[in-house]
Amino acid sequence: SATHRFTLARLKDTGLSLLVVCACPDVHRIPADLPGYCDALLWKGMAGHDFSAYTLALREICKHSPGANVIVQNDSVFGPFTDLRKISENSRWDLTGFTASGQMTNHIQSYAFCLKQVDRIKMARLSPIFFPAFAFSDPQAVVYLQELRMARVAARSMKVGALWFSDIKQVLDPTLVRPMELLEAGFPYLKRSLITKHKSYMERERVFERLERYGHPLDI
C-alpha cells in the first residue's frame, strides 16, 4: 500500500540496514518493487501474528549479523516521522519500548521496540517470548502470552525501559488518547487504528491533517 511504501522509504532514508519480513500466501506474490526498498527480504506465510515475523527476523540476524542493534516495528503504525537512529543510539536500556502501558499489567507495547546486541544467547533468554518452534495466529494469545510478558521476561537478564509510560489512572493508551502530544514530544509514529477500529478516539480529519503535514500519502 501507499502507507507501506512511505514507511519503507523513510526507513531507508535513515541509512540503517533494512530487513523486511513480507507475509503473503505465496512467495511469488511478494510485490515486485519490494526488494528495492530493503537490504534483506524474508517471506513468511499468513499463519502467525506479528511476533512470528519478529522471531523469524531476529533469528536470521543472529545468524548473519550477530551483535547488531535492532529496531523492530510492525505495520500497525504510520511513520516513522522522527530519526529512529538517534532514539536507538541514545537508549540506555537493552530492550527499549517506545511506549509502555499499565493496561492489564505494566508492559512494553510491542508495535515497535529496540533490542541491543542481538545474538544467540540473548535470543535463547528471550525464547519464552519469541518461540523458536511455533507461533500464534490468535491476536489475544499474542497479547497475553507474548506482548504482556515481553518486558518481564527480558528484565530477568537485561535492562528494560520505555521512552513514554502511561499510568492507566490518567491515560489508558497514550498512542490512542494522546497521539498528537506524543508527536510533539518526539514520538515517531501514529497508530493506523486511529482511522479504523479505534477511530472513536480522534477525529479522522486531525489524523489526516497531521499525515499531510509529514508528506504522507492520503490514499489510505
Image: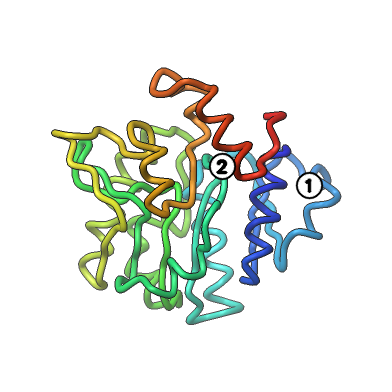
Whether tag 1 and tag 2 are in contact, CB under 8 A, the answer is: no
Can you say which quadrant of the picture contains the N terminus? top right
Indicate the amino acid at tag 1: Ile
Can you say which quadrant of the picture contains the C terminus? top right
User: Considering only vertical position in the picture, is 169 above or below 155?
Assistant: above
Q: Secondary structure at mark 1?
A: loop
Direction from residue 107 to residue 38 in the image, left or right: right
Q: Distance from label 1 to label 2 (Cα)? A: 21 Å
Q: Earlier in the sequence, mark 1 or mark 2?
A: 1
User: Considering only vertical position in the picture, is 154 above or below 196?
Assistant: below
Q: Quadrant of residue 142?
A: top left
Residue shown at 49% from the left, 63% from the top: 71
User: Considering only vertical position in the picture, is 53 above or below 71?
Assistant: above
Q: Nearer the viewer, residue 52 or 205?
A: 205
User: Considering only vertical position in the picture, is 155 above or below 149?
Assistant: below
Q: Quadrant of residue 157?
A: bottom left
* Spot occupied by residue 175 in the image (x, y as percentages of width and height): 38, 39
Q: Residue furthest right?
A: 32
* Spot occupied by residue 60 in the image (x, y as percentages of width and height): 58, 69
For residue 30, which numbered disc appears in the image?
1
Residue shown at 25% from the left, 43% from the top: 101
Direction from residue 19 to residue 202 in the image, left or right: left
Residue shown at 62% from the left, 66% from the top: 14
Q: Quadrant of residue 160?
A: bottom left
Indicate the amino acid at tag 2: Phe
Residue bearing mark 2:
78
Residue shown at 57% from the left, 39% from the top: 47
Label 1 vs label 2, nearer the camera:
2
